Image (cartoon, coloured by chain):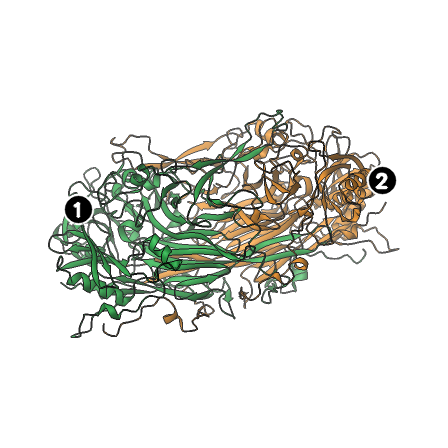
Chain colours: A green, B orange
Amino acid sequence: MMLDTSTIPGYTIYREEQGGSSQIDPATLQPPLHPLDQLSVEEISVTAQVIRNHTAFQAVKFNCITLREPRKDEYAAFKSGQMSTLDRRAFAIVIDKSSGKVAEVVVNLTSGTVEDLKVLDEVAPTLTLEDLDVCERICRTDERVIRVCQEIGISDMSKVFLDAWAIGFDDRWGMERRLQQGLAYYRDSAYDNQYAHPLDFSVVLDTDKEEVLAVDVRLVNGERTQVPFEQHNYLPEFIGDGYVHDSLKPIDITQPDGPSFRMRGNQLHWAGFKMHIGFNYREGIVLSDVSMYDMYEKRDRELFNRISVVEMVVPYGNPQAPHQRKHAFDVGEYGTGLMTNSLKLGCDCKGVIQYLDAVLSTGDGLPAVIKNAICIHEEDNGLLYKHTDYRDGSVISARDRRLIISQIITAANYEYAFYHIFTLDGTYKLEIKLTGMLNTYCLHSSEIAAPYGTEVARGIDAHNHQHIFSLRVDPSIDGPRNSVIEQDAMPSEHPVGSEENMYGNAFLSKPTLLRTAKEGVRDYCHETSRAWAIVNPHSTNPSSRKPVSYKIINNNCPPLLAKPGSMVHSRAAFARHSLWVVPYKDYEIFPAGDYVCQSSGQPGHPHNPTIVDWAERDESIEDTDIVCYVQFGLTHFPRTEDFPIMPAEPVSVMLRASNFFVKNPALWVPPTAINKDKTSQYAVSPVDATPPSSCCAAPRIPSRL
Amino acid sequence: MMLDTSTIPGYTIYREEQGGSSQIDPATLQPPLHPLDQLSVEEISVTAQVIRNHTAFQAVKFNCITLREPRKDEYAAFKSGQMSTLDRRAFAIVIDKSSGKVAEVVVNLTSGTVEDLKVLDEVAPTLTLEDLDVCERICRTDERVIRVCQEIGISDMSKVFLDAWAIGFDDRWGMERRLQQGLAYYRDSAYDNQYAHPLDFSVVLDTDKEEVLAVDVRLVNGERTQVPFEQHNYLPEFIGDGYVHDSLKPIDITQPDGPSFRMRGNQLHWAGFKMHIGFNYREGIVLSDVSMYDMYEKRDRELFNRISVVEMVVPYGNPQAPHQRKHAFDVGEYGTGLMTNSLKLGCDCKGVIQYLDAVLSTGDGLPAVIKNAICIHEEDNGLLYKHTDYRDGSVISARDRRLIISQIITAANYEYAFYHIFTLDGTYKLEIKLTGMLNTYCLHSSEIAAPYGTEVARGIDAHNHQHIFSLRVDPSIDGPRNSVIEQDAMPSEHPVGSEENMYGNAFLSKPTLLRTAKEGVRDYCHETSRAWAIVNPHSTNPSSRKPVSYKIINNNCPPLLAKPGSMVHSRAAFARHSLWVVPYKDYEIFPAGDYVCQSSGQPGHPHNPTIVDWAERDESIEDTDIVCYVQFGLTHFPRTEDFPIMPAEPVSVMLRASNFFVKNPALWVPPTAINKDKTSQYAVSPVDATPPSSCCAAPRIPSRL
């Protein structure tokens, strides 16, 4: 069966030419510019070809084909010149179409061979967009679904829409089948907002067998819930002439000399920063080899080996079935890369934009490209510093810039915009903006939404939920051997009036070295403004006499509110804590497991360990190659203002230089007195239409004075 | 004695003409455009004249002359048309030059009379810039100061600089004198950074008598501390050709059709928001009558009566004398208005800027104007919302704007930039950027900086400190009668497996109504992501069926780290808690008291109550006219990166609509598909100099496929 993959919106699929040979000689593959570059279109084709030619599998569905990054020691040897070449490898997860067995395959593209093949039990790979596409298609023609729709007055099945979601874990079927669930909505017309018309049933289906397993109808007092038919729309088709034009005058952002960054392939240089920008189907953007030029030491200094968002979970807080199933792991269950938007100039970002494409693959092993998947641009960032000498009024000020590497994903109803931001003071900040549509459900006339949700419009319940993200930071603060020191702001322990604290004003930052992985499981503490310094114990700041460090600043980290014993508490164990620190291991990336779909989260799974298992090893995290998992996010009690489409809500986490540089690292930036801004201008108030000196609150100078 | 006030940098002083009559007939004063407008230059002159003509005072130093805002009931009656006119009033604090007595004077400018005069005991008014100017002048010629300088090898007193600070409370003199202290530094040349050369002594002086009272020298093991003579500079004079030019290409921000806001005098309209922008010597910017147009209800809806930053404290954490004295209250002790910078186009803000001037007064009662004290501009604010229908790839997105009303102050070494920000979703956010210079002190060769400070360069200790701001919000959420509900995100109390919480995933927002002022003293709770909803119990959101509200979002609120029993814990009582809610009283504004200088902070002061006294009354704060004091800020353990000049560090607090509007209030904003951005463009990578489709990670399309 050949899937009609050309229907994946936003994907450009590279099909084999009719009648042409589909065999490519691996020896003809062009080597990548950089070992961490995404697989090319050609490399994906070759990977699929090598796997298909392998005897073990004849009819497979490709779940993913992606770069197998080199092992860290290999890559370090290559970078240092100890190794002159690196073999290029691809990693694929395949599903045998007849048996349903899952296997991981490593293909050596340099040699054109399958290098490793591992068949795994009790795992369910990511649900791809093609997998999710099954849901609506088969449900609309399923007799049970048709019947439950008819019961609530819907006969036209083309108006019934099903958002396909992972199911969490459903013990009716366990792991024998690759499951998904469909959440049902109604649309009155093609572009009508379906989230205004949630239906009272959901569907469970077998992804690979394309079979509806159950239609779960919720009855309240034995009754079905009426469809909320009232429209709540936001698209231009419905707003019509409801927009207010010319109220917001244009703001033009132009860069006549181009952007300040330079790119060679996927390597970026900007304002002293250097990094490689990678991308894969699961994590989306991956930043590697991040370094910053130190103007004082006159050398590039390593900061981070690798940064990416490796997991997230969105647990919903309504206790009624089937809502406990709603706790989406958008990275692990669907793939942040797969759900990436193709960006549009001037819509998603303004200014001079450099886009990079994403190279993915289809279930048939065909290369698929998302054009403009990654946006790179810079923005003015306000004041970098300012000081006025109050004695003579002399002023110095400089303006900051930020470089932003971004990606926006659509996860059914929600959108997440990921902004990896660098500023001139050496800071890295991940800001995520949450927008899109609230997940909604219908209210029976006897129900109220409180306390587990908000009635955002009559009969429409938007449930309480959390968004908890996991940022994986593989640091290399001045080199690979790092430690983490927890820092708590505390009053001096000495009493007021004592010699050590005579006036009672003493306070300090109390350091606690985290020595093993179990000690590395930490929570944020508001009372002490807790932060975590990633230090290099071998590199001492000559002024502060402290080890150089980058500090994790993370006070946007709500605790996981689901209780111990709940499914999500078990499956999203990573989200229980603000920070986990573990020693680095090759290919140990995903804190909720490599296979998140249908995972139970129980520790000790032979093929699917989670961060709980890694921490349980309790290995040393002191003065060694470590990895930090930083959890952050927000708890969302929906507001009527979030309906029918949510104003973007930002949340962020930061890594800031702390006694890393000997001085302010941005003193090379010319101040505004030298680097004059020619484009800013005085406003003339349109109402008064007089020059600013009189239209503002300037004094009327009395002639008598 | 006539002060040479023309030397106040940034002030334009309006002097009386030589030989001309200095008497103005109050009847000739032009009425203001708006009752909340600052006093005009002429009104300040008349106020001084009326006070001088009053018999009680013949020789006075004017500490302040500022608008006496109308009482709330009067102003409401005027706005509603019940009163046709409002008398215009000025408020002055004067110091009798001979006796040193302090009086508050209310002048009715409409009638030209002193309407109220109150002599106060045991209070010390704000230290003005003129007051602070005394310090360096008299210290340089003081024999004791000269001698202690000579002892450490400094003979040229023109190279000795003293930053004048309030003193907190020094029991050597109590309240008989108006005190200040001078922190001593050295400069090698005119623009040399003095904070690189802190000296080991400080001076206490009488502000009004211009008399040095004490020179406090710190001895370590009986020794003086050597001057750290090494230079650490950041000004162009010293950087020379050390700047890296052309690395940051220009970013031009232009608004060809002008800004989107309109102003009539000091009243601003922008994107549905309306407000009045006031200013005074103490609070700086004051926003009044903030409302937003509701597109659904087709009316302006009141949000806030008045918003301003009414206090801040910067306690330092080094226990050694004399550092316990360092806990600056920059609003109460110096006046945020008085310290305001005159802003420069393209340096402080970019785009099309509307400036407003500040009208202040001198010690002689002369009007003084800071040109361009307030900046009003708008910025693109990224995504307002976005959603992609994954089924067909259709996309809707709109861009957000923010309106920013800002002011930057210089408080000796530090600068604070205050940004009052409004966004299209109805949010108000106060962001403060901290920059300027760290306060520094010298280290004796036997000392180390840790744990109470950081050695930011050899021999220079920057002490741990906190910045805690107090934002006063006088809400009027859909009208004057409001309440505050504390909201805590909590797991359901029902156990996993119970009927109410079968799956353990249930969580909710637990509401707690704050009923009296004592209950209104609250702390942030990280574990419950605590927020406070200011609600109008008489206005119910028809969808959510909850009272309409604006939520205080404040998780940047470190606890005050000074211990109970310390001077700062007593004086800065407001900073002990994240939130205080009290009933509204006319002219009850400043939580650390009207007179902060030399205040002890003890409750029960007859002329100088603080928020502790207001809360102690324990009056009802339920369904009444209330005021919220929101404390936020940060704890700063200095980093070497903060030296010699600090990269700006932002901190913010937010007020967000929560079930206030029935839907997203920004659906009137045309989406980008309709409102096309013509100025953004694709980048061409300068290194590869090829079009973006090939210079980025686009696939090389294999010809065979």
Label 1 resides on the chain identified as A
Residue B250 relative to residue B675: left or right: right
Residue A156 seen in the figure? no
Determine which of the numbered discs, if any, sits on residue B58 in the image: 2
Q: Residues within 10 Å of mark 2 (few under 14, many from 20)?
A: few
Instruction: Give the structural element (helix, strand or loop) at label 1.
Output: loop
Instruction: State whether residue A370 is above or below residue B105.
Output: below
Which residue is situated farthest in the left direction here?
Answer: A98
Q: Nearer the viewer, mark 2 or mark 1?
A: 1
Instruction: Give the structural element (helix, strand or loop) at label 2.
Output: loop
Which residue is situated farthest in the right direction here?
Answer: B19
Residue A341 seen in the figure? yes
- Asked where in the image residue B256 lies, by quadrant, the reply is bottom right
Q: Quadrant of the C terminus of chain B?
A: bottom left
- Asked where in the image residue B703 lies, by quadrant, the reply is bottom left
Question: Which residue does the numbered mark 1 point to in the structure image?
Answer: A121
Please state which of residues A112 and A221 is positioned toward the viewer in this rendering. Answer: A112
| Amino acid type at image mark 2 | Gln
On the image, the x and y values in percent for residue A136 come to 20, 56
Please state which of residues A396 and B2 is positioned toward the viewer in this rendering. Answer: A396
| Amino acid type at image mark 1 | Asp
On the image, the x and y values in percent for residue B505 come to 29, 37
Q: CA distance from mark 2 to mark 1?
A: 95 Å
On the image, the x and y values in percent for residue B529 come to 42, 38
